[in-house]
Structure formats: C-alpha cells, structure tokens
Image (cartoon, rainbow, N blue to C red):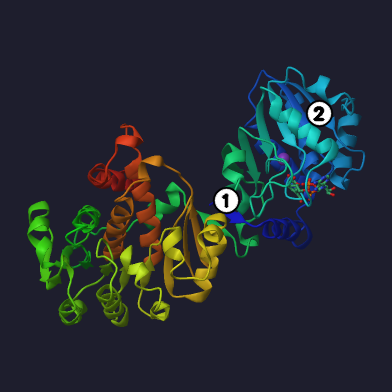
Amino acid sequence: MTLICTKDQARAADACAIQDHHIPSLVLMEHAAMETCRYVPAGQKIRIVCGPGNNGADGLAMTRLLLQRHEDVSAFLTSDHLSDDEQTQLDILHSFGIHVQTENFNDWLRDAQVIVDCLFGNGLSRPIEGKYKDYIEAINASDAKVISVDLPSGLEATTGNILGTAVQADVTVALDCLKAGHLVQAGPQVCGELHCADIGIPKSLHPGAKELITKELAAAALPARSIYGHKGTFGKALMIGGSRQMHGAISFAAQACYRSGIGTLTLFVPEPITDILSIKMDCAMKLSAPSQDGFFAQKAVGQLADQIHSFDPVTIGNGMGRSAVTEAMVRTVLESECPAIVDADGLWALRHQRQLLLRQADTIVTPHVKELTYLIDLDVKEIADDPIHAAEWFASLYPNCTLILKSGITVIARGSKQYVFVRPDSGLAKGGSGDVLCGILTGMYGQAKDPLTAAISAVYVHSLCAKQKKDPAGIQPEDWIYRIPEAIGTLRRA
Ligand SMILES: NC(=O)C1=CN([C@@H]2O[C@H](COP(=O)(O)OP(=O)(O)OC[C@H]3O[C@@H](n4cnc5c(N)ncnc54)[C@H](O)[C@@H]3O)[C@@H](O)[C@H]2O)[C@@H](O)CC1
Ligand SMILES: [K+]
C-alpha cells in the first residue's frame, strides 16, 4: 500500500512514530538510508550533497552504507548548523575516520557519475537562494544521474510548487509515503522516476492520507465473477445518450460496457440512431425514444421515467447534447432510486441542479477538469493545479457521491476516502477515451454494486487497455475496447 500525504500529514506520522510509539528517529533514518541506497548504481563515482536538516542526515547515513559497499562515495556538508540527527550521523562518520567535504563544491562535484540530492526534503520552508541556489544549479548542470532523497530539493511537498529553484532529478525516492507535491504542479516534471520506500512507519499512523492505485489494489477491487452467476447476477444496465451528431460516444461506451462483464445492456437512444447502433452492436437491446432534430425530444423524458426503475445501474450523458431535455432526463435519473453514473453532457446538465447529487442511492460522476467546474465553485486552473484538493472539496459537498476526476492524474473520491492513479498516457488523450472509461465503469458497477471498487478497477483497466505495442498516436477507441477482456484477465491473474 502506497500512501499520499501532505507535508504536515507526513511530519505528523514521523512524530507519532517517534514520540508516541518510541521508534527512534535514527532507526527510521537507517531504514531510509538502506532503502535509498538500493537505487544507487554500483561502480560509479557517487557524490552526496547534504543540507542542514534530516534530509542531509539521510545523506550522511547513505555515505556510510555505500562505503560499506566499497563504492567511490563522498559527502559534502553545506552548512555547519546541523540537526541533532545529522550531528549524530556526522559523529559516526568521524568515528570511522571518514572525511566529509565542506569546501570547493564545484571541484568536488566534477566528474560525478551519480549525485545524491539530500539538500532539502520535507522541511523546506522558504524559497531557495544564495549558496543553495548555486549548489542546485551546479547539480542541474552536471551530466551525472541525479537521485533525490524524499523530494527533489526545492520542490514544496504539498503544493508541488518550486520554491525559487529545484533539483531536476532522474530518480526520486520518497520516504515513507508519497507527498502530494510529487504528483501535482511541477512535481512530475522534476521528480523523474518516482519510487516510494517503506521506512517502518506503520500505515495506521497516517490518518487522512490518500492511497495510490496500484496493480494490487486494482486487482483486489476487480468484481468477483461467480461461475454460478447468470446474466441477472452481473447487472442490468441502461445507458441513456447519443444523438445523430454523436452516436459514436454511446456506441463506444456500450461496447466497452459489454466487454467489461455486464449481464445485460439496454440503450435508450433517440430514434434516428437506433438502426445505426443495431448494426454496430447486436448484444445491446435498444429502446427507441422520440427525437427532435436528431436529439431526444421532450416526450422522451416521460418515456424514460416509465422505464427506468427496472435497471441497475443507469448511465446517462454520452453524446446526448446540451439542452433542457438533457437537464430533465438527468433529473429523472437522479430523482429515481437507481444507482446512477453521470458522464459528459450529463455533467453539464447538473450545473444548475447540483443538489441532485445529494441523493442517497449510489451515484458516480466522471468529470474532466472543465466538467468539474459545473459541480463545484472552482475554476479550471484551480482544479488542474490541485486536483487532490478539488476532489476533497467535492467529497465534502456530496459525501455520498463518488467522483472520478480525470486530470493529469486521476483522483477517485468518496466521503473521507481518496485514491490517486498516476499513469500518464498520451494514447488516452483522444475523443472517445472518456466514453470507454464510462462503459467499463458501468460494467464494473453492474457486477460489483459498489461505487468505489467499480471506480478503482475501471480506471485501472482503462489504463491497461491503452498499453499497446502500437504507437499511442495511432490508437483509436476500438483498439482500447478490444483490449478490455485481455486487460481484465491480466489484472485477475495479478
Ligand atoms: N525522523 C524523521 O523525522 C525522519 C526524517 N527523514 C528525513 O528528514 C527530512 C525532513 O527533515 P527536516 O525536517 O530536518 O527538514 P529538511 O532536511 O528538509 O530541512 C530542514 C532544514 O533546512 C532549513 N531550510 C528550509 N528551507 C530552507 C531554504 N530555502 N534555505 C535554506 N535553509 C532552509 C531549515 O531551517 C532546517 O534547518 C525528510 O525529508 C527525510 O529526508 C528520514 O530520515 C526519515 C526519518
Ligand atoms: K532532497
């Protein structure tokens, strides 16, 4: 399990482990140093840059461990004001007669093959300037591989902002937990390859932390599929959407839903596209609704209200267009007691009737950044800059509603629970991608009957579908859709 914390949450977990549970701080530091050394390649000229706090102390402990590995390693101490633990680490080095460099930084750094950045970690508290700026510029100018311990120095742990300047790492080894700043704003650009090292702080000491969606978590969330089940066991989904202009959206969602394991699927679509969908999909049943100009007509609302109650779940929004009829249909769905999934134009239709999201029945919404502005009072920049905070805010307003926020990272939130998925893939940056996710989600919910596990497994399977031998530029929605059964199989065997 990999947790994601703010700076303060991570510091509180450290303090709780040390003060309340009597795990000595130096024990945690030894774990941190041992774990981080695993990422340092052997047989290289290693230079470790140590700042004035416990991040620097980690670097001194690493120096000792790497010398035990017979590496060509040397540490540079940038300050003579040391934290207590750093003084202890320095005393240990001195007791072994190990010299620590304090002058001629640029000469000392020359020809380094690996630089370990232990200038600042979770204690960075102000913009970097003066000699520290010079050190960081020299590190960034070097050709060496740069490994940052806990955080690239200069990266603010919670916000992902760069305070003044920051180390550009090739590898970052986060200690104990990921910090939100690793994942948002400038974080992904300066962290390089991101790893998280367990340093022995129990997970239970991180109240309020978010959880990273890993393969293991997604595999555990995948709905079980009893061999004794029948089509009624696996969900009887209704999908409402489509228009003459955008029948592809509901077609993608429907095909993805069927390939994700739904028991039965019925499409409620405007009359002019019923035949098109019949040609594209034998497996889904069709309810043909009155139409006007290729979209649902007002009369379709009453027809929907008569049909809706026998379905579980009901998905609405894909390609249905933006109109008063769309608003009325979304209202009809959310005023019913059916579990509901709202996507695309359905989200737009909520902007003046957000109170519908306070319903008791299971509800999942799947906005991208712009669509979330219809549901909460944050603008696009605010949401894109801090999607974790935006999701937290959403969950506080609509505690029974499950959010899948599609941003640079994907954030799933419900009540106090929050999960983050990080696997950027340009192959998914295409029209139709959201419809496929919505379809997978509908399939997963039909089987799991649980919004959180359905959301976690759907997001992961969707991303697995994008991993193909083909170049991402050439992948189209059908390619993802055909991959769904294989992706689910891979995950089930994990
Ligand atoms: N027991 C613990 O608390 C553990 C801490 N660990 C390490 O300790 C780190 C946190 O240690 P600290 O809280 O000492 O924090 P840091 O080591 O990140 O740095 C804090 C020190 O830097 C100074 N400082 C902050 N911003 C500055 C700036 N812009 N310019 C100049 N000086 C600045 C502060 O005044 C303070 O002296 C973690 O990131 C992690 O690497 C790990 O060893 C695991 C255990
Ligand atoms: K660092």
| In front of the other: 15 or 459 | 459
279 with respect to 460 (left or right): left
Identify whether 145 is placed above or below 246. above
Tell which tag, 2 or 1, sits nearer the viewer.
1
Identify whether 39 is placed above or below 160. above
315 with respect to 303 (left or right): right
Identify whether 297 is placed above or below 446. below
Dot 1: element: loop
Could you tell which of marks 2 and 1 lies nearer the N-terminus?
2
Cα–Cα span, label 2 and label 1 = 31 Å
Dot 2: element: strand
Residue type, mark 2 in image: Ala
Visible in this render: residue 301?
yes
| In front of the other: 335 or 56 | 335
What residue sits right under mark 1 in the picture? 184
User: Measuring 10% from the left and 56% from the top, which residue is drawn there?
Assistant: 276
For the C terminus, which image quadrant?
top left
Q: Residue 202's spot in the image, x, y percent? A: 64, 56
Mark 1 is surrounded, within 10 Å at the Cα level, by few (under 14), some (14 to 19) or many (20 or more) other residues, namely: many
Residue type, mark 1 in image: Val
User: Measuring 7% from the left and 59% from the top, which residue is drawn there?
Assistant: 275
327 with respect to 62 (left or right): left
Ligand 2 quarter of the rendering: top right
What residue sits right under mark 2 in the picture? 75
